[in-house]
């Protein structure tokens, strides 16, 4: 029987433990793949010293396992940052933010020496953009940012849709902002595209991780965990 997507996520979550040095402070991302990594962290015989977390959700899970969570402001460098992604391209450029934690994820990723990305094989794509690109925005800029994407950014245009919570009201991030999910993009040059979107007034964070791309990707496939180094 083929392995489920969740089993592939569990395998890469466990495999990422090989990159964790006991006694160090590490960065921890957000999502269902990271939930498996956090569970494996809790089972390590020699623990990490502490973690910096990218979301309230991951903070709760880490503390439940007795792992100390530090404020990012109190840490200068992290050994590694471990996180999932919504898409990963052949150069290690990512789309992230499906879980809404993209801003804190980018902040924590930027503190780390090495970004270990953990994904199941369905996330590997030739070109970023089939997954609707999350963009965290200040609410008063929603309409103008939507128009900018409709008009095109670096030759690709998209339909930016306001993300809603399950009760139908706008989804609010951990930072009190909203998210536009941009459909229909084809991101040929992720580094230039990330910079161009960062320049749009009202954009807090774009879910393209090109300046903070993965250094290593652990890809969960039917044949086992594949390690890709960029
Ligand atoms: C959260 C993220 C996640 O890493 C991404 O959405 C993948 O999630 P999952 O591991 O649940 O598939 O970027 O903001």
Image (cartoon, rainbow, N blue to C red):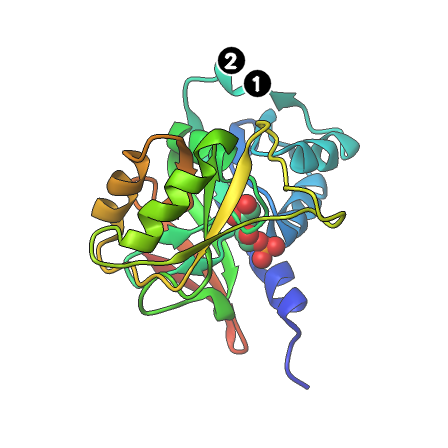
Quadrant of residue 67 within the rendered picture: top right
Specify whether 89 is left or right of 224: left
Q: Residue furthest bottom?
A: 1
Above or below, comparing residue 34 to residue 123 in the picture = above
Above or below, comparing residue 98 to residue 102 in the picture = below
Mark 2: is the Cβ under 8 angstroms from ligand 1? no
Name the mark on residue 71.
Answer: 1
Specify whether 5 is left or right of 127: right
Q: Nearer the viewer, residue 130 or 72?
A: 130
- Residue 73 visible? The answer is yes
Residue 180: image location, x then y, percent: 49, 46
Q: Residue at x 66, y 65 (%)?
A: 6
Residue 204: image location, x then y, percent: 42, 31
Q: Residue at x 51, y 59 (%)?
A: 119
Number of numbered markers: 2
- Residue 79 visible? The answer is no
Q: Nearer the viewer, residue 12 or 4?
A: 4
Q: Residue at x 52, y 42 (%)?
A: 179
Above or below, comparing residue 59 to residue 145 in the picture = above
Q: Residue at x 32, y 69 (%)?
A: 126
How far apart marks 1 and 2 lie (CA) works out to 6 Å
Q: Are marks 1 and 2 in contact (CB under 8 Å)?
A: yes
Q: Secondary structure at mark 2?
A: helix
Q: Nearer the viewer, residue 183 or 80?
A: 183
Q: Residues within 10 Å of mark 2 (few under 14, many from 20)?
A: few
Q: Which residue is mark 2?
A: 74
Quadrant of image for the C terminus: bottom left
């Amino acid at each position: 029987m083929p392995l489920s997507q969740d089993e592939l996520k569990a395998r890469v979550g466990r495999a990422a433990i090989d990159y964790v040095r006991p006694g160090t402070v590490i960065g921890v991302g957000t999502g269902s793949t990271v939930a498996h990594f956090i569970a494996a962290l809790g089972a390590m015989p020699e623990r990490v010293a502490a973690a910096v977390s990218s979301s309230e959700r991951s903070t709760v899970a880490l503390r439940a396992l007795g792992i100390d969570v530090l404020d990012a402001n109190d840490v200068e460098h992290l050994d590694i940052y471990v996180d999932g992604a919504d898409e990963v391209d052949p150069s290690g450029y990512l789309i992230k933010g499906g879980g809404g934690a993209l801003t804190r994820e980018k902040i924590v990723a930027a503190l780390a020496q090495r970004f270990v990305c953990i994904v199941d094989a369905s996330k590997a794509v030739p070109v970023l953009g089939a997954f609707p690109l999350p963009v965290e925005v200040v609410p008063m800029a929603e309409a103008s940012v939507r128009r900018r994407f409709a008009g095109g950014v670096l030759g690709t245009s998209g339909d930016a849709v306001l993300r809603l919570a399950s009760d139908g009201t706008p989804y609010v991030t951990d930072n009190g902002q909203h998210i536009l999910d941009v459909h229909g993009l084809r991101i040929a040059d992720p580094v230039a595209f990330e910079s161009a979107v960062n320049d749009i007034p009202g954009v807090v964070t774009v879910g393209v991780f090109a300046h903070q791309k993965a250094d290593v990707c652990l890809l969960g496939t039917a044949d086992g965990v594949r390690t890709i180094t960029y």
